[in-house]
Image (cartoon, rainbow, N blue to C red):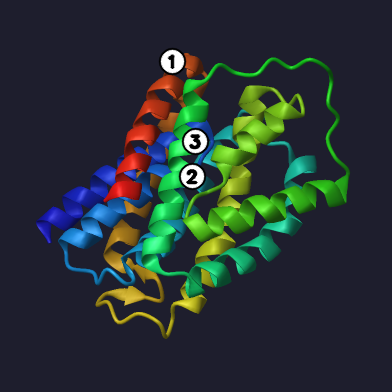
Amino acid sequence: MTFEIISFGLIGILAGLLSGLLGIGGGIVTIPLLLLAFTQIGVPSVEVMHLAIGTSLAAMVFNTLSASYSHYKKGGVLFHIVKPMGVGIVIGAIFGALIARFASSSFLQIFFGIFETLLGIRFLLPEPKITKEKKLPPFWGLSLISLAVTTLSTMLGIGGGIVNVPILTHFNIPVKKAIGTSSALSFLIALFGAFFFLLVGMHSTRVNDSVGYVYIPAFLVISVISFFIAPFGAKLAHILPTKILKRIFGLALLVAGLMMIFK
């Protein structure tokens, strides 16, 4: 139990910092760590990835709520973007949970590893130069984008910020407002994703101390710690040089992704 608490506590710290600092839910880092922790405590291999995904989404509800509120107080959340994308989030969360439910744990792990590796490479590359002004899509366009992002995010147990921030900056949204808006979107993705993941796993897992695909001890420890750490990450986002941080983060993602694929 001591090993569990320490492991989940460290995961909570990382999730909270990343949520506030980069506008992401932290799942891109917490999933590999939860996978490692769950394997150590004896979770069956056939459902270890499903449990990691569901627990990650549930824990993200609180750190993304904390981070988005911190960004909101700084004027960093654009609600004219959140509203249309929120429509796509509800539908995408259902699709993502259903796809994950019928996919094997090994498939989800390899797919996650490939996704994480590609993201790591992307973070290590220079930022593309914006050549001309790009207007935001209309309401339905933003909803469709959000539906696709949320389906992928729920399926992988991530908050979607890792995709939403580049999308928003592509449409010339300032980086700090893109991060703040992404935090709010990640909260909605985590909320609906966790809810539907809990439902689809309700009669599919027999792991002790779990409800659906949510492992309660990990959920509680990670949620509490990340909730209080996230505001510090939000403050750091307005202070630290994001380019250097993204390079370090990209290298970490690359290594973790390759380990997920070849484990």
Q: Measuring 35% from the left and 80% from the top, which residue is drawn there?
A: 205
Mark pair 2, 1: CA separation: 22 Å
Residue 247 in the image, given as x and y percentages of width and height: 43, 20
**Which badge, 2 or 1, comes first in the chain's sequence?**
2
Q: Secondary structure at mark 3?
A: helix
In depth, the one of 61 and 173 nearer the eye is 173
> Dividing the picture into quarters, in which one does residue 193 lie?
bottom right
Mark pair 3, 2: CA separation: 6 Å
In depth, the one of 74 and 186 nearer the eye is 186
Amino acid on which disc 2 is placed: Phe
Residue beneath label 3, please?
A: 119
Image disc number at residue 34: none
Residue 236 in the image, given as x and y percentages of width and height: 45, 23
| Circle 3/circle 2 CB separation < 8 Å | yes
**Which badge, 3 or 1, comes first in the chain's sequence?**
3
Amino acid on which disc 3 is placed: Leu
> Dividing the picture into quarters, in which one does residue 259 lie?
top left
Considering only vertical position in the picture, is 81 above or below 46? above
Please indicate whether residue 187 sits to the left or right of residue 241 in the image: right
